[in-house]
Each structure stands twice: as C-alpha cells, then as structure tokens.
Image: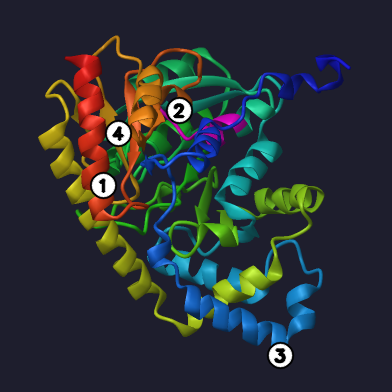
Amino acid sequence: MTQDIFATRVQSLKASAIREIFKILEAKDVISFAAGAPSPDVFPGKELAAFANELLADNYSGALQYSVTEGYTPLRNAVRERLCRQGSVSEKDNVIIVTGGQQGIDLAAKVLVEDGDGVVVESPSFIGGLNSFRSYNAKLFDVRLKEDGMDLEQLEQILKNNKIKLIYTIPTFQNPSGITASLENRKKLIALANQYDVYILEDNPYGELRFAGENVPTIKSLDTQGRVIYCGSFSKTLSPGLRIGFVSAREDIIDRIVVVKQVNDVHTPILNQMCAYRFMTECDYDAHIKKCAGIFGQKCAVMIEEIERCFPKSVTHTNPQGGLFILCTLPEGSDSKAILQKAIAKGVAFVPGNTFLIDMESPSNILRLNYSASTEDKIREGIRILGDVLHECLD
C-alpha cells in the first residue's frame, strides 16, 4: 500500500508535538513543563464523583441515552446566561456545547474555511488551531505578536494584499506566549475585520484564570456585525478530561456548526454535561475558579523567580497575568528543539517553539513553559536543571 490512499489534505499533517513529547515522558522520570493543563490537585473530583453516582442511580436513562446535538439544555442555558452576564457575548448570540475547545475550533473552521481560503494566525499560535486549518487546506498567514497583541500594521498589510476569510486569535493569556491583547488592540482588530469583511475566531479557554491585572472585554463583546465566533472551554477551569467546550456566535453560524457536529460525533457526552451543569449550579463555580487562578498565580511567580535566578541573562520571558504559560526567548540563532533533547536527557521537558509556527520544520528560538501542572518544589527543581542545560548550550 502507498501514501496515495490518503486524502491530499491530510498527507502533510503531523501529529501534535506536545502529544509526542508525552509519549517520551511516559517512559522517563522527567519533570514536565510541557503540559497544557491544570494540576489534578484542583480538579473537583469528589463533587463530580458524587454527581455522577447520583445521576447514574436516579437518571441513568437520561445520562446514558442519545441526546440533542446542541447540548444538554440546562447546561447550554447556564453557559449562555453566564457569558451574557459577564458581557462576553450578547443576548442575540446562540450557544452550542462541543466536545472540548479543540472541537469548537475545528467545527468553526469546517463551516467557514474552503480549500485555499486565507486564515491569519498569531505567530506563535496554538498547534491545535493550526492543524485544524491545515486539515481544511487553508492558506496560513502569520502575524507576529507584540506585548499588546497582534501587530495590526502587519495584519492590515496582509488583509490589503490577500483574500482572507478568517482571523484566529487567542487574545487573553495567549497560548503559548501568555500575552494579553490590550483593549485598544482589540478595538482596532475588530475595526479591521469590519473594514475588510473578515471573520474572527476568538479562542478563550484561559480568560477566567486571571491572577493579576484588570479584565479586558472580549473581542466578541465589541462585535456589532456578527462576525466573531467565540470559543471557550471547561478544560482549564473544571477538568480537561470531561471534554466540554462551547461556541457562541450568531444563529446561522451555530446552525451550521450543529449540522457538522452531527456528522462528527452526534453530541457531547451527556453524563459529562450533566455533571458540569450540577457543579456550575450547586457548587460555587466562581470561588472554584478564583481558587485555581490563585494557585496558578503563585506557581507562576515561583517559576519567574527561578527563571530570573537560574537562566542565562540572554534569555527573556513573558510575564502573564493569568492562564497557564510563560514563553521564553533565547538568543537569535538558537534552536529550542535541539535543546529539548538535552533537557529531557537531564530530566526536564518543555515545548519547543517550532511547534507553534506555520513552518514547523524551521528552527525556533522560543520555548513554552507550563507552570500550572507542577508542584512548586518541582518547578524550582526543574527550572534549575533547565537553567544548567541552557547555560551549557548558550554560554
């Protein structure tokens, strides 16, 4: 058999480098800063176990049967009410529950992107988003990130000179950089989208995990023309294993997403949705999120303190106000992928920067560190080891 049996659009796709790193780590005793998840210490396991037991005992038919594609109605209504109350979306926007934020990105791409359509992404950007767009044969254009968000001058040049269908952005605690776009940047971004008739996919799985600074309105909240699709998730605030996300957009877009989701997986597991709804409405969900954010903020502070103590002075880093990630920039000409192999051999892992770029084969001098999944002691130990590796490679 030959490679010819595979559809052209998937022949060039590569497995997530992050998932591949996890395979390596399974066989090694390694301190991992490669995760993109919270620590299991903050999972509400007892509460979710109690809800699941009750639901299976008292309502097993509803929890185990097929259900509507749009999502478990009480959860969908609760999510929509919460988003509207926060001002994240408007009352006229509709909501669908999806199987994790990744599916939300993929379904939005599926209903909007045709072969050859231009999609603008941040540089660096989330590999799950990049691979979704690649799988639909999008033509990717990258825009560098500045301290206040996307470089809008570069973006406008791309919009002027190319046929662009969609802009994909993670404006709050961006993955992998941790950067948050300013309100002014967001206003200018939506203005450019209106001017050039381009849609925006706003990916916001981390937005509630703020531990410093002031909240910034979502791009969706600034949308007056119905061109922003807003994607969120319970993966970072409740549990990634539940695989529950949500998409909010104008009604006709959600209607199309419903149809393609029916082809994809019929509906998101109902038992999981029921458990999430019970937690949202019977527990103090806001207090839980605040607790998670506080823990992550303390871990972030520890990691930054150790980075500044242990890393070469030629290495710079971002200073996130929330979320899960710090991005480190090595001197020009460095290759973080090559450094990763030496780091793993010494007992520590991170995600190299090429993973987050349009051209994954190009060397990159950035690397992503996760602080949420490790203990403070492991952060100190791991950053010390990584510092030694970086001194060895860069000095």
Q: Quadrant of the N terminus?
A: top right
- The correct choice, above or below, for 252 with respect to 362 in the image is below
Q: Which residue position is annotated with label 3? A: 58
Crowd around label 4: few <14 · some 14–19 · many ≥20 (10 Å): many
Q: Residue furthest bottom?
A: 58
The amino acid marked with disc number 2 is Phe
The amino acid marked with disc number 1 is Ile
CB under 8 Å between callouts 2 and 3?
no
The amino acid marked with disc number 3 is Asp
Which of label 2 and label 1 is nearer to you?
A: 1
The amino acid marked with disc number 4 is Leu
CB under 8 Å between callouts 4 and 1?
no
Please provide the residue range marked out in magenta: 124-131
Q: Which residue position is annotated with label 1? A: 379
For marks 3 and 4, the one nearer the N-term is 3
Crowd around label 3: few <14 · some 14–19 · many ≥20 (10 Å): few
Image coordinates for residue 222, horizontal then vertical, percent: 40, 49
Please tell me whether mark 4 sits on a helix, a strand or a loop.
Answer: strand
Q: Seen in the image, is 282 located left or right of residue 327?
A: right
CB under 8 Å between callouts 3 and 4?
no
- The correct choice, above or below, for 83 with respect to 313 in the image is below
Q: Foreground: 40 or 385?
A: 385
Crowd around label 1: few <14 · some 14–19 · many ≥20 (10 Å): many
Q: Is residue 154 magenta?
A: no
Please tell me whether mark 3 sits on a helix, a strand or a loop.
Answer: helix
Q: CA distance from mark 2 to mark 3?
A: 46 Å
Q: Which residue position is annotated with label 4? A: 327
